[in-house]
Image (cartoon, helix red, strand yellow):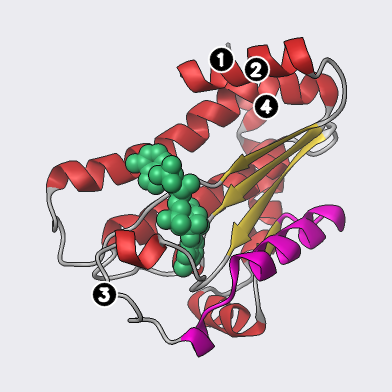
Amino acid sequence: MRAAGAVEAFLRREVPGGRVLLINNSGFGSYGRFPEPNLAHQLEMLDVNVRALVQLTGLLLPLLRERGGAVMNIASTASFQPTAFMATYGASKAFVLNWSLALNEELRGTNVRTLAVCPGATESEFDLRAGLAKGSVAKSLSMTSEEVVTMAFGALASGQALVVTGWKNKVSAFVGSFPARALVARFAAKVLARFRLKQVQR
Ligand SMILES: NC(=O)c1ccc[n+]([C@@H]2O[C@H](COP(=O)([O-])OP(=O)(O)OC[C@H]3O[C@@H](n4cnc5c(N)ncnc54)[C@H](OP(=O)(O)O)[C@@H]3O)[C@@H](O)[C@H]2O)c1
């Protein structure tokens, strides 16, 4: 809460014009049988992976709408299916993906959009922090952070709502989800706008 307020104050003071890009990247996972290593760790994961992302976006959205811009949400290939032995992590990333796609539909017609980025295994501190021994994931299955970032910004530039990085990850995401999620998001937005949104009373 304080961080978002400080960021907004900084942007208004030091960078009074220009579009805003919010990247919700912070996140961590944990391998094991729920609730290993302990329940507090699982709840902290939800705080970082889900709560902080909703909070930061909610607090910065007025500024984003004022100036235009984008919100890049880092999800995962884990978003596409239940992930036993990483149950909370996978579910938190499913939230990130669906929330990002839904928000993008709500923002259609405004000067703000969202992009959900779904990397698979990527060389970083992630696996070590998640409890895996060093070198547990074969390098041939991993991408570098630079590759992921390049693809993410390419997708942002071309106006995509969702990008799964790399062909191996695309295959895994495709197998994990029928039909294509971005299309489902578009269809659901149209149905909800027509049959629910008009009934809202505030
Ligand atoms: N690496 C992968 O295989 C992979 C695959 C799919 C998706 N992702 C996602 O990619 C994003 C970036 O992860 P990464 O691969 O770059 O891993 P990383 O090297 O471990 O970086 C994780 C980032 O999240 C922050 N973070 C972790 N725990 C936090 C906490 N409790 N409170 C606040 N900040 C915290 C870290 O900040 P500090 O360094 O300051 O602690 C760091 O900036 C995450 O959302 C992750 O879920 C990673």
Q: Which residue is mark 4?
A: 198
Mark 1 surroundings: few (<14), some (14-19) or many (≥20) residues within 10 A: few
**Is there any visible trace of residue 94 in the rendered image?**
no
Quadrant containing the C terminus in the rendered view: top right
Q: Are marks 4 and 2 in contact (CB under 8 Å)?
A: no
Q: Which residue is mark 1?
A: 5
Image quadrant in which you'd find residue 194: top right
Nearest to N terminus: mark 3 or mark 2: 2
Q: Is residue 155 above or below residue 105?
A: below
Residue shown at the point (32%, 75%) measured from the top left: 134
Q: Which residue is mark 2?
A: 8
- Of the residues tagged 3 and 4, which is closer to the observer? 3
Q: Are marks 2 and 1 in contact (CB under 8 Å)?
A: yes
Residue type for callout 3: Ala
Q: Nearer the viewer, residue 122 or 85?
A: 122
Mark 2 surroundings: few (<14), some (14-19) or many (≥20) residues within 10 A: some
User: Alpha-carbon distance for marks 3 and 2?
Assistant: 39 Å
Q: Which residue is mark 3?
A: 133
Nearest to N terminus: mark 3 or mark 4: 3
Magenta residues, start to end: 139-161
Can you give x and y, in whole percent of width and height, for residue 1 in the image?
46, 19
Q: Is residue 79 above or below residue 189?
A: below
SS type, badge 1? helix
Residue shown at the point (65%, 78%) measured from the top left: 166
Nearest to N terminus: mark 1 or mark 3: 1
- Of the residues tagged 1 and 4, which is closer to the observer? 1
